[in-house]
Image (cartoon, helix red, strand yellow):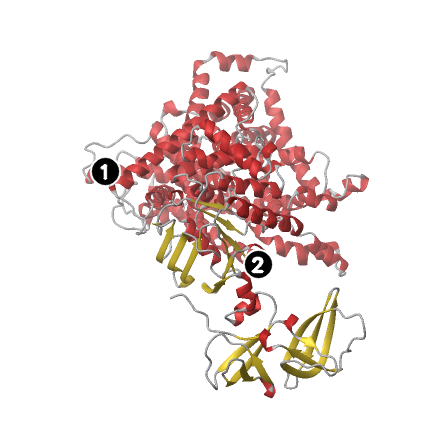
Amino acid sequence: MSDTAQAPARLPMSQAGWVQAWPIYPLLLFVVALFLYPVAQILVLSVFDAEGNFSIANYVRIVTTPVYLQTLVITFKIAGWTTFFAMLAGYPVAYLLANSSLRTRDTVTLLVLMPFWTSFLVRTFAWMILLGRNGAVNRLLISLGIIDAPLSIIFNFTGVMIGMVHGMLPLGIMAMLSVMQSIDTNLVKAARTLGARGGQAFWRIYFRLSLPGVAAAGLLVFITALGFFITPALLGGRRETMISQVIISVIQELLNWRFAGALSVMLLAAAAVVFYLYDRLLGMSTLSGGGTPAELVSWNRHGVLARAGGFLGERLIVVLGWLSDLAGDLWDRVFPTSPDKPHRGLSRGVLWAVSGLVVSFLCLPSLFVIPVSFTAGNFIEFPPQGFSLRWYETYLGSAGWVNATIRSFIVAGVTAVLSTTLGTAAAFTLVRRRLIGRTAILSLVLAPLVLPRIIIAVALFYLYARINLIGTILGLVLGHTILAVPYVVITVMAVLKTYDERLDQAAWSLGASKWRTLYHITLPQIRGGVIAGFLFAFIISFDDLTVALFITGGGTSTLPRQMWNDLLLQVNPTLAAVSTVILVFVTVFVVVAEMLRRHAVARAG
Amino acid sequence: MTEARTKLAIRGVTKTYGAVTALTDATLDLGEGEFLTLLGPSGSGKTTLLMMVAGLVPPSSGDVWIDGKLATYAPPNKRDIGIVFQNYALFPHLTVHENIAFPLRMRRVPSPRIAQEVERVLDIVRLPHVASRLPRELSGGQQQRIALARCMVYRPSIILMDEPLGALDRQLRDQMQLEIKDLHGRLGITVLYVTHDQEEAMAMSDRICLMNNGRIEQIGTPQELYFRPCSVFVAQFLGESNILDATVVDAGESVVLDGPSGLALRALADRMLEQGESVKVVIRPERLRLLRPGETDDNLASGTLKEMVFGGGVCRYFVSLPGGTVLSLKQLSPDGAQPQPGDTVRVGWSSAHALVLRQCARPT
């Protein structure tokens, strides 16, 4: 629904308007107190010395110490390559999803999103099983006679790339898909009937129109990748240390808040520079999906840089078009076509093959934790030795593991309820009321999505240290809610935007009070979005390591925190058993929630 | 229609999707310069047929010939056809000029020629001043004309139009109908047109191919389809009809039939009928007359006036015959005394306007 169509329904802001906007206030208060204030504080802290005088000593230290600058360069390099590979591998899958039947799309989407739901630590652990010197990949390659000696594919750049691309692909694919789905399929057909060969039609029209999606997805992936620390810590070597890892060690080993604050500012500045360049080259409107497709893709932008880029891009696309048509010509020459026989397209087959590979890369690795967890041996190895349940016994017999598991469930459950309540209420105000500074408010509420999590975690740690929330379940719940609430706001806003408000008006006119209308009419209709938001919130809390890393300790660990300790110190098959339990639980949870959601959507639809 | 060169020949084309048959055994010829419309309700197979001519959907069996060349499975860019899509499918990132130049670039026409040609077609569609604009800066009608210009610029053998006026409002649609018809006449282009709007089809077409349930019901001029429908479906889809069940009594020049509840009918038939055969008789509502006392006609029926609906220039009457059959009549509104509902009235019609449905000569 367009804004103009909704405008008359929204009331202009008046004194009554401020009162009527009340559902957003709890969330606003929450975000200001637990996000804006602590983050601002930690950043401000970086420009003061211990005596409280203004000082840029921390920044001088970063700029003059080669190791910190190197870390920054490495961080950019890793994030850059991750973005490149994720876009390259994700594009064909997104294209396939955008151009296939609804059933195929649903199935493949579920597969693509599976790793997104699976715990990040479980996935990284699975890669450790697969990529090691004696890991499954090396064993397979050697037994097939492809290589003689094991490849080094872990604890180096390759390992980090595999882990990071694996982690970022779902996000990249879904972001590209959302733009690709808005491309009119008739345009490519039109280009074909106007005389374009397949290659020209694809590159000049489809690819060209999908570029804003690629750019937006690339930006998202890049910004997210900047803040990573789990993958480089577990799959990389010392030369793949990223800036978040440095922040963690500065806090955990030196407890130097001011310096950690300065490093956070560097990380933020890096993200800001990328945003700025993106805006100069492509315009920010591509992100929100505002503007019309033509606005998003017009090469005629101002600025020499942008124009030169546009010109080169145009030429490149034409060349790519001729090249793929040349390939098509060669193919036709080897396998001639004739107008009296149907022929199978080369491109469709290649597309399916590539997408199949990418989707297998996404889905299969996590499954390797399952057989490993049943090993009778003392070490993690694939194929496992014999069969036993001893590692499950170790898991369930350990008070530490069991307590961590219970704590994780409690925290995730409470976080999901709190986020869903705050987020849903706020979404109503954001969609239905005309607020002054609505964009600013929305940006603030959604900021935890883009801000590297490590900065939020450090800021919360600093805040909690002074109000004695460290190591408490309450502290964890509050922190996780900050991370999770943007997802609820987004999913509920999405369903509310398509919700016909006249249904509410009808209910009021039929005699229902506002609350009864909400309960009997509105909520059942938007249930799909609310359930999706709840699901997101639960999984984000259940999977979070970053916040837990700082504000939980030995006796107050959550499951990810406990896994992290073991992964760093003593990798053993108990981890596989824990991972398997998490994998099974999350799968069941997601499937049940998806069934509930589909049921709700079907009823509402 | 004059004998013209065949531009498009469709021979026994069938399309199945799994167990679903979208098009059954379609055979159709399109002559040079002809304007032929595929007309039918949604799901009748008309768009499937169009997409197969365009090469965007491969047929399951049968042949498609374009300009004397076999093109059944030729790719769309090798067919020498042009399509105007319902939503125009103008490339949003290219200006009007670039949109129209696109097919010429794909054919590697030299740049100076491209500029000339684009100017030429923009003049034809009377929009010479919009060349540098983006499609979204144009109105719906203008976009429609640019889509047409983009199609005409490379002079394809056939121009296919898939409900091109569907997105326009009524007034603009009427105007564009005239413009397309005028362009067709002036430039002698060959057009295969798809619509579900029967008035549009009748107003624009040289011939109409009426489709239903994946089959071609009847092909003919608008007059043929209207006055000589060959099935109940055709009679009901184009205009309104009274359809009466009857049994043949005497199969002479003017057939005598036994109609519902003993009504004796005289009708025309353009085929040989057998005595005792069950047939359907079609009479258009505007061909039925309310008879004044003393007036008579070839066919007579008397019944009760059930309802009268005043519609401005024309009035509609519903007359219930004994036995339950209801006849629908359309007459110019009388200015004098009117019969009132409940009155007994007499209805008459000429046997020339009562047609025994013939069997369709279905293509095999």
Q: Are the residues under badges 2 and 1 in a single subunit?
A: no
Residue nearest the observer in this picture, B240 or A77: B240
Name the mark on residue A141: 1
**Quarter of image, res B133:** top right
Tell me the chain of label 2.
B
Q: Which residue is mark 2?
A: B202
Which part of the image, by quadrant, shows the C terminus of chain A? Answer: bottom right
Q: Is residue A326 left or right of residue B177?
A: left
Mark 1 neighbour density, 10 Å: few (under 14) some (14–19) many (20 or more) = some
Viewer-nearest of labels 2 and 1?
Answer: 2
From mark 2 to mark 1, how far is it between C-alphas? 70 Å
Relative to A516, is A322 above or below? above
Q: Amino acid at mark 1?
A: Leu
Mark 2 neighbour density, 10 Å: few (under 14) some (14–19) many (20 or more) = some
Name the mark on residue A366: none
Provide the secondary structure element on which disc 1 rests: helix
Relative to A465, is A583 above or below? below
Residue nearest the observer in this picture, A373 or A91: A91
Q: Is residue A212 left or right of residue A325?
A: right
Residue nearest the observer in this picture, A370 or A50: A370
Q: Quick check: can you spot residue B309?
A: yes
Q: Amino acid at mark 2?
A: Met
Residue A46: percent from the left, percent from the top? 58, 19
Residue B215: percent from the left, percent from the top? 45, 64
Residue B49: percent from the left, percent from the top? 44, 56
Tell me the chain of label 1.
A
**Residue drawn where x is 60% and y is 53% of the image:** A527
